[in-house]
Amino acid sequence: MTLGDRSADELAAQLGISPCAIGEAVRRGLLRFEKHRGVACWRFGDTRNGCLRRLDGQPFDINGQRVKAEAETKGESWHRLIGLDDVLAKDRHEILLIPEGGKDALAALHFAAAEDTIREIGVVAALGSAVEVIPDDIEKLRGRSIRIFPDVDAAGRDAAARIARAIAKPAAEVQIFDLEGLFRDDGAPVKDLFDATRIGYDDFEANRDLSSITDFDSKGERVQIITDEHQFFLSPFSPHHVSPECHGFPVYPVSSSEELGEELENLAKCNACTARNTARIRRWKLLQDLAVVQQRIARELSVDELLKAFDEWYCASLPHLDPNKTRDDYLAMFLGEFGKVRVPTGEGEALKKALERVLTLSVLALPILPGIAQPPESWRRLAALHCELARRSANGTYFLSCRAAAKAHRGLNKDSAWRINLALDRLGVVKCERVGDARPGGKASEFRYNLPL
């Protein structure tokens, strides 16, 4: 039984999804409205597979259990990817692949509408993280570029790894987009792509990757490129943190404790909360800025200096803080989180620009490596990345993780990039000043580039 156009408007309002995205899902045959178990429902699926949810957002009551969605299929049919009929009919070559259900798939169309790519981009979805992509579906993805959006949990990461392994060889390119470390406008952590539609304006503006959800040429820090199914390594994603907006004041060498104190005050004021439920995000931005100060002055900030910055931030933020939390509560979070800052402000942007530069260089423009005849292009391109990062460093040293280094050449993964870095160190191209932490979320290795810039 068809429920009419009002159901589409009701679903858009209930999910907070663009009506354009809802309308496109209907046009593609991925969304329809019907009665099921006596209530109005929306069905996400195609002729191959699908599931139903109640239009009012409530769960189904099935055999005494409350179930948020009911799949139509079982066995092998449950593993069939939804949306491939549309991909083949329209010959869509860039695909957003959603491992876990219809709401995330609608969110993908929502972002496509916002980025004005909704007519071109393909959306393919599985019904859950347990999916095992069947060979027939894998073949239909041959020659296409795939960007996978896993949920932010162990099951989501495992699903992304499993799918990427299965499709890496036939696909033109496979990417995994990491949503970890983001927060919704209510302060809750982002768990999936649907949650990402609820990221606050400031946080969204500060994360350039979020404005390029459907842009396959935009390979920021949240994008991992899978290039070789036989050497596929996927560790748990390291938390990414938002990059602050421009503060509107210069960063300058500190020549006195008075100037340092003034800079800390300015940082605190610029990162102060201006709305409720933003304390965690704004506090983290302040901590990133303080990490940059430490790098520039080549020493750790003292406890007194940290407290000075915190007190300024707390006083400026107080009207918008949780009245149920005390100053000591916020101070404990501030000091406890400072040691967790992995990528100080600006480093992520410097790496992104360095990679953009390196990937556009001709082979003739790449560095000549001493002591080795006809080195592989991947070695020279990775050396070029070191060179670019050194040029952007204030003190000559810079941080580079194996995963980031692998982005310098399509044939690299994090392990091969690490081996080449060791070779470049041996050749005298770079000097590894500090080996990175061998744990997820640890600090990257610190290098110095030895060739002429």
Image (cartoon, rainbow, N blue to C red):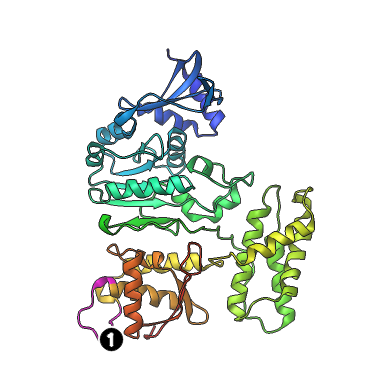
Classified by dominant secondary structure, the portion drawn in magenta counts as loop
331 is higher (above) or lower (below) than 139: below
Query: Compared with residue 386, is residue 121 higher up or lower down, i.e. above or below?
Result: above
Would residue 182 appear left or right of 32 to someone viewing this image? right
Whether residue 45 is visible to the viewer of this picture, yes or no, is: no
Q: Quadrant of residue 13?
A: top right
For label 1, the residue is: 370
Residue 282 relative to residue 167: left or right: right
For image coordinates 31% across by 84% down, the residue present is 427
Question: Whole-percent x and y of residue 45?
Answer: 37, 28
Q: Position of residue 409 (x, y in %)?
A: 30, 65
Range of magenta residues: 367-378
Q: Determine whether the residue tagged by mark 1 lies in a helix, strand or loop.
A: loop
Residue 40, horizontal then vertical, whole percent: 50, 17
Residue 85 visible in the snapshot:
yes
Q: Whole-percent x and y of residue 98? A: 40, 40
